[in-house]
Amino acid sequence: MGKLLLLVGLAIAGVGLLMMLGLPLGRLPGDVAIKRDHFSFYFPVTTSIILSIILTLIVSFFRR
């Protein structure tokens, strides 16, 4: 369990570093953004799908 928590923490830190360097994670084509006068709604559909695929590949790799 400790190794898994360490890997997850390193992965989160790596994503944070990439975002600081300019990777536009969270503003990809396909993400829903609605802006009205006093209301804004943002749902990252494409970002969620990409992160799900990446996490599935990482978990399946470490289970083998």
Image: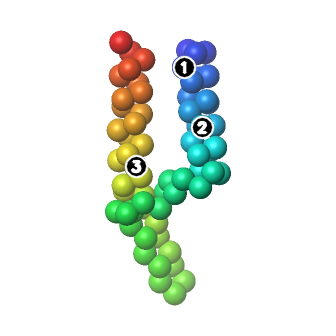
Could you say which disc has been placed on residue 14 in the image?
Answer: 2
- For mark 1, give the secondary structure: helix
Image point 47% across, 79% down: which residue? 35
Q: Position of residue 37 (x, y in %)?
A: 51, 87
Q: Which amino acid type is marked by label 1? A: Leu
Could you say which disc has been placed on residue 48 in the image?
Answer: 3
Q: Which amino acid type is marked by label 2? A: Gly
* Quadrant showing the C terminus: top left
Nearest to viewer (mark 2 / mark 1): 2
Q: Gap between marks 2 and 1, in whole Å?
A: 15 Å
Picture quadrant where residue 13 is located:
top right
User: Tag 3: Cα neighbours inside 10 Å, few (<14), some, or many (≥20)?
Assistant: few
**First reached walking from the N terminus: tag 3 or tag 2:** 2
The residue beneath circle 1 is 4
- For mark 3, give the secondary structure: helix
Is residue 29 positioned above or below 60 on the image? below
Picture quadrant where residue 63 is located:
top left
Could you say which disc has been placed on residue 24 in the image?
Answer: none
- For mark 2, give the secondary structure: helix
**Which one is in front, 61 or 8?**
61
Q: Which amino acid type is marked by label 3? A: Ser
